[in-house]
Image: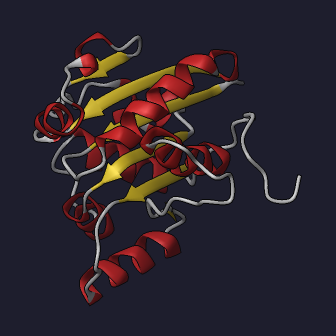
Amino acid sequence: MKNKIVVAITGASGSIYASILLGKLAQLKEQFSDVAIVFSKNATDVWQHELGNDTYKSLSFKRYDTMDFNAPFASGSAQYNTMIIIPCSMGTMGRIAAGISNDLITRAADVILKEHRKLILVTRDMPLNLIHINNMKTITEAGGIICPACPSYYSKPQTINDVAATVVDRALDLAGFSLNSFRWNE
């Protein structure tokens, strides 16, 4: 069975990561059967502010409203096996860690965790306080993966998109995708 992926985009700074991820997923379509997208209430405003465009309106993947609890991935029976939250705000992470399913993003994350599937949070905040660290610990103990948006420079990136792509490639690696990416000492 091919991957079924949920991509959630929150209002944390870092819309470039989501934009690059969605572009790369469009190129990897033979590796999944479905990609579903959900934006938090503030995510589109941050996208427009940071990227200066509204390309999120014309994505090739099905988009769900943040309060649509009838979305297939709101239930484990739909067998979505991976969820990537990119960027993931500390507020979203805190609600997931506390088990608060007050919107489709947090409900889907709860489903992914309870089904022992792959939850990847590309967190985007610094510095961290002890509450953030404890929430990261809780999610890690529950089976989630915390993937801070910390770019690498081994590949000698030349543009801001190249830098952001180092984070996206790492998240896609963690999700189990096969992609052509810089590998250390290869």
Residue at image location 43% in from the left, 56% down from the top: 121
Image vertical order of residue 104 relative to residue 110, above or below: above
Q: Is residue 143 left or right of residue 92?
A: right
Q: How many marks?
A: 0
Between residue 154 and residue 149, name the one nearer to us. Answer: 154
Residue 51 % position (x, y)? 24, 33
Instruction: Tell me which colouring the rendered structure shows.
Output: secondary structure
Q: Quadrant of residue 22?
A: top left
Q: Is residue 91 left or right of residue 128?
A: left
Residue 12 % position (x, y)? 22, 52
Q: Residue furthest front?
A: 158
Between residue 181 and residue 75, name the one nearer to us. Answer: 181
Q: Is residue 75 left or right of residue 48?
A: right
Q: Quadrant of residue 131?
A: bottom left
Q: Residue furthest right?
A: 186
Residue 135 % position (x, y)? 33, 76
Residue 114 % position (x, y)? 47, 55
Residue at image location 58% in from the left, 48% down from the top: 157
Q: Quarter holding the N terminus?
A: top right
Between residue 129 and residue 33, name the one nearer to us. Answer: 129
Residue at image location 35% in from the left, 43% down from the top: 108
Image vertical order of residue 57 relative to residue 85, above or below: above
